Image (cartoon, coloured by chain):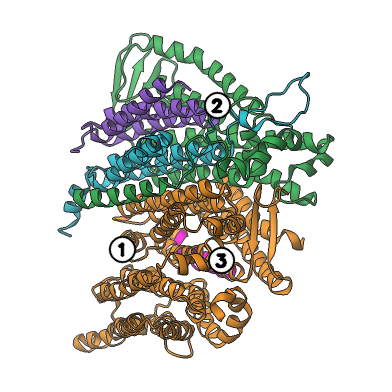
Amino acid sequence: MNEHYPALLIISPLLMAFLVSGMAWIRKGICYPLAVVGSGLCAWFSVRLLADVLKNGTVQYRLGGWEAPWGIGYHVDSLNGMVLVVVSVLAFINLVATRRGVAAEFPEKEGAFYTLYLLFIVGLVGMVVTGDLFNLYVLLEVASLTSYALIALGKARAPLASLNYLFMGTIGGCFYLLGVGYLYIMTGSLNMADVASLLPDIYQSSAVWVAFIFCLVGVGVKMAFFPLHVWLPNAYTWAPSAVSSLIAPLMTKVMVYVMIRLMLSVFSLDFTFAVLKLANPMVWLSTLAIVMGASLALAQKNLKRMFCYIVISEIGYMVGGAWLGNAAGLTGAILHILNDALMTITLFLAAGNIYYRINGLELHQLQGLFHRMPLTMACFVTAGLSVIGVPPTCGFFSKWYLITGALQAGQYGFVAALLFSSLVNVILFFRVIEISYYGGMQHAHGHGSPPEPRTEAPATMLTPLLIVSVGLVTIGMYTGTIVTTLIDPVIPAALLR
Amino acid sequence: MIWQLDLAILTLVIFTAIAAISVKDLLSCAILFGAYSFLMCLLWAIMAAVDVAFTEASVGAGVSTVFFVAAVFHTTRRTRD
Amino acid sequence: MKAAGLIIVLLTGGLLLYATQDFPPWGAPDSPASTHVSPRYLQKAMEETAVPNVVTAILADYRGFDTMFETTVIFCAGIGCFLLLRIFRQKPEDRYYRHIATEITLHIKGGKIPEKSREFERIDTLWTPYDLIIKTMCRILVPFIQLFALYVIAHGHHSPGGGFQGGVILGASIILLAISHNMRTAIARISERIDNLLMAVGVFIYAGIGAVCVILGARFLDYGNLSVVLFVDKIMARSHGIFGVEIGVGITVMAVMISIYNNLASAGKQDEGL
Amino acid sequence: MSDLIPMLVAKYNYWLYIVLMMIGLYAMIAKNNLIKKLVGMNIFQTSIILFYVSIGCKKGAGIPIIQHGLNTGHHAVDLSQYVNPLPHVLMLTAIVVSVSTFGVALALAIKIYQKYKTLEEDEILARLRPR
């Protein structure tokens, strides 16, 4: 059984998705348990796979039994393994946490909803483990297509936001496909390792660097890197809360992973840094992304929309870190994939809980929330502290690595942007905390009315939220272990010098 | 491959593409789009990609056009550009 | 927007054009694309899978994993359209009936005639009289189209075609029925429930065949090991495995095409079509 | 100039796909009508398919179905007789992806029309602004 983990990881949610979709027309009640089983199996197998990778080193899996350049192969090292666990476990937690919201919002189409939910997980997980460039495109489209449909389920402007996302996403996907086509015409192969071994002879060819640019732009659109981010705020704001807490933490992070994978394993570091000389412009772009994301977040009046802009500025952290071109920066970027996924899911789950109770997320509606939902708000504050980067939480450590890397690389602009965005985050979160803590008190005093009753979110929604926010602190405490066991092995030797 | 035929199809492909995006009626756009797909399919058949041509003929020129007309039927034919 | 669009487009086009200079000339037999990976497919496909159509062999066997997700993508589209458009509860609306003998049209506001009767038939709001020729022609054509579709699926090993194309044609035959008669006639042949079940069954067959290979101790989608259950040698087992997979693809694609058409053409009501 | 013309002739397929891609991309960015954008998107996708199919082409080669029969038996396959089949496989997948995206996008367009009664982007945005 051990050797089949990479395949089982994909098959179990995939088969369950089809079962759920069929069962929706036979017995509706069974849909949700099946979805939990599928997602749970996926999480379980990915944890086992990571354990396997840590024990025996890189795992290869040949699908259909064909060896690599001819068939499709999986390639799982500790970087994949880590992202894999993050994706599958967080998706599972979110599935449990948002059960009530989904049941209330789409009572008749629950089956179809969970089918797409599982297929979205399949798409992301597949993208992470695959070692084939074209397979990655197909899985990218699975994940995108499901996310278009899921986002469009929201209220008000959701269909329009989703259609815009569809246009942008298709452009991104097509650009990536073009890049792969250019690589294929120059090398004749689609397997990542094979392409990497063929490329050094033709580094000077203009087609190769154009291929790289197109892959980068394609991936950049999908991860909402700064000038290409326009689809993100609307899409994530208007999506139903169960969907935004699934897609916001996972999709963009997986795309960052894909970018790092392309940089490290397809185009080697020699090419990305020595031949292309793109490092400086990319770091400057991410500096701009961080500053713009943070400043735009300040201007928002809706909680979810504010988080969306925070996500955009965090994308800047990761891209910038990866392009700093030294070990500390790359470590910070990879560590931040893990941390940011956790922070974002905590924020969005908290927002989902608030929305479930007060049916709105405008900042002025949050008054008195600390008294009504103390535990949810406690988790919210933990996540906020982590986004700001306060020591015991995990956000601090990745920021530390990023700043160290930036100082080593001499990118003082990037350091300044990191500090600036931390400051802005302080303002953002303390503004929310002020409104929700003191806002209600003044209100109560003014009218002399009794304090509002405690209406904490139901336990099924609260427990997952508590788990992820405890995770924020735990991951922070074990950062050293994570870096030495998971991240150090994948940092290329050329960077360690 | 007969290059005259090739050239004629290539020219027509570009023309139908430009026509499809500039015509001011969505139903005409649907038909032009079907024609574009069909010409594309011919082009691929010439390049010996029979499976791709077959798929494009059944999907691009066939079912896609039907979907397109169905959607136009439930929305509007009007377009300003 | 127009100027910005033009600039972006010219920039992209210029970049792509610039890169073409390093391409091998068009149709060169010694380009890397034709010499690195693909020769092995052409040389070995016949002896390894017993499928002369190399495209089918690669599609369903060498890169069968891609094709599984291709089918999943189309399945997603079907489910997505259903999820976005389908409306279950609807207000009673105006309905039109036609007395078959006298051809008198009844317009019932906000309801329907009490019971099913043989004398009245329900017609669409935008019903046009006398489409007898179209109706009869299409009714005659549909079985032949379906036969051809089955041929395309079954003969995909030896000629262009396969599950996907066959499935689309099969779906198109039902769509033709829905266009030439009306949507209710087509839905009476394949109900929404059956259609949605078929959609899931098709991909399930595909992924299931792969999973059976895992159970038999081989890699996922390694059809060679199906020889144990199919009682043929490994090469023929691959050929049969490919065929099974193609059937799965065909079923899903057919069901999805019908489902997307029904939802788009009736804006989710599944009542009156084009 | 003298070496430009042979280059044009040798690679005209690649040039053509770039022209089509530019048309599609321009329509996606600059057109105002949502359905027109969709058509542009489809032209964009087909142009990429054209590019891939052109990669697989070999001059003088036939369709990638191996000639076989009772009396030919198994013999070495002459590679120059068959075009490269791999891009065809990839593009079958790409066509399917494009039709799926098209279907979902049309469903979204219908939903948008039901809500705003128009498909022009600027009219929709104008309708959203007062709120």
- Residue A94 numbered tag: none
From the viewer's perspective, is the residue at label 3 or at label 1 nearer? 1
Which region of the structure is painted magenta?
A: A85-102
User: On what subunit does the disc labeled 3 rest?
Assistant: A
Percent position of residue D82, x then y:
61, 30
* Element type where label 1 sits in the image: helix
Reading the image, the residue beneath label 2 is: D60
Q: Are marks 2 and 1 on the same chain?
A: no
User: On what subunit does the disc labeled 1 rest?
Assistant: A
Q: Is A299 a magenta residue?
A: no
From the viewer's perspective, is the residue at label 3 or at label 2 nearer? 2
Reading the image, the residue beneath label 1 is: A227
Which chain identifier belongs to the cyan chain? D
Q: Which shade of the palette goes to chain A?
A: orange
Q: Residues within 10 Å of mark 2 (few under 14, many from 20)?
A: some
Q: Are marks 2 and 1 in contact (CB under 8 Å)?
A: no
